[in-house]
Image: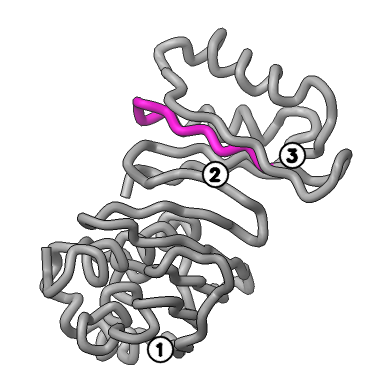
Amino acid sequence: MIGPSSSHTAGACRLGRVVNKIIDGGSVRKVKIQLSGSFARTYRGHGTDRAILAGIMGYHSWDSEIRDAMEIADQRGIRYCFIPEDIPGAHPNTARITYTCEDGKKGVVEGASIGGGNIRVDRIDGMDVSFTGESNTLLVLHKDTPGVIANVTNLMYWRYGDLNIGNFHLSRKERGGTALMTIEIDQLPPEQLIEDLKKMDNIDNALLIRAV
């Protein structure tokens, strides 16, 4: 890894890479990074700012480009800012990343670096999630309607039986509204699974975040 800190540099880079996975080949044009807790107090000295920015651009925690992330972002025409501001109740090493892509897509990812380069993603676009990025993760946005979860898991079993679910989390803002399934799986699923999920009734969108 590029130092000096596994939590403040390597973990920070992996948080940025979650955004890179979510935009799935898109091009970020504007990003606001809110840094909370110890991230806010030491981000310049520990390179947290450069590491998160590098991760957003797709670099790994061991890539030397982390050191020049700001210059690379400037060359790519990415507008960025860092805001040291505590998030109530958040883990001490938390970042909230708000991004806008070239195609107009916008989103917010909030997560924490929990030690040893490990991360925990807590929220995506205001929806509670729970995954570490260690496994390939399916995010399935859907209507909170009876039978949707069973339909998704049945599809995975009957058509893609080699896939093993390691963790499952459901989040919803209100009953009968929009809900989000977070499904961590041990294997890398075929791209056709995502297309099949998108065609299902009451599914608004499906996304694969490959292990970061």
Q: Nearer the viewer, mark 1 or mark 2?
A: 2
Distance CA(mark 2)–CA(mark 3) = 12 Å
**Would you call the spot at circle 1 few (<14 residues within 10 Å), some (14-19), or many (20 or more)?**
few
Q: Nearer the viewer, residue 198 or 137?
A: 137
| Image location (x, y in percent) of residue 43 | 30, 83
Q: Nearer the viewer, residue 160 or 44?
A: 44
- Residue 80 visible in this rendered orientation of the protein: no
Quarter residue 153 falls in:
top right
Residue 71 part of the magenta-drawn span: no
Task: Provide the residue span drawn in magenta.
Answer: 180-190
Relative horizontal placement of residue 73, taking residue 19 as reference (left or right): left
- Disc on res. 207: 2
Circle nearer the N terminus (1, 3): 1
Q: Secondary structure at mark 2?
A: strand
**Quick one: label 2 or label 3, which is nearer the N terminus?**
3
Instruction: Name the spot of residue 165 as percent of width and height, x first.
Output: 46, 22
Q: Nearer the viewer, residue 79 or 2?
A: 2
Q: Residue at x 31, y 67 (%)?
A: 12
Q: Earlier in the sequence, mark 1 or mark 2?
A: 1
- Which amino acid lies under the numbered mark 2 shown in the image of this protein? Leu
- Name which residue type carries label 1: Gly
Res 107 quadrant in image = bottom right
Tell me what residue is drawn at x 43 percent, y 25 percent: 166
Mark 3 lies on residue: 142
Q: Position of residue 186 (x, y in %)?
A: 36, 26
Label disc, if present, on residue 77 of the rendered structure = 1
Most extreme residue toward the front, as rendered?
A: 89
Question: Against 194, is 1 above or below?
Answer: below
Q: Secondary structure at mark 3?
A: strand
Q: Could you give the CA–CA distance between mark 1 and mark 2, rounded to whole angstroms?
A: 27 Å
Q: Are marks 2 and 3 in contact (CB under 8 Å)?
A: no
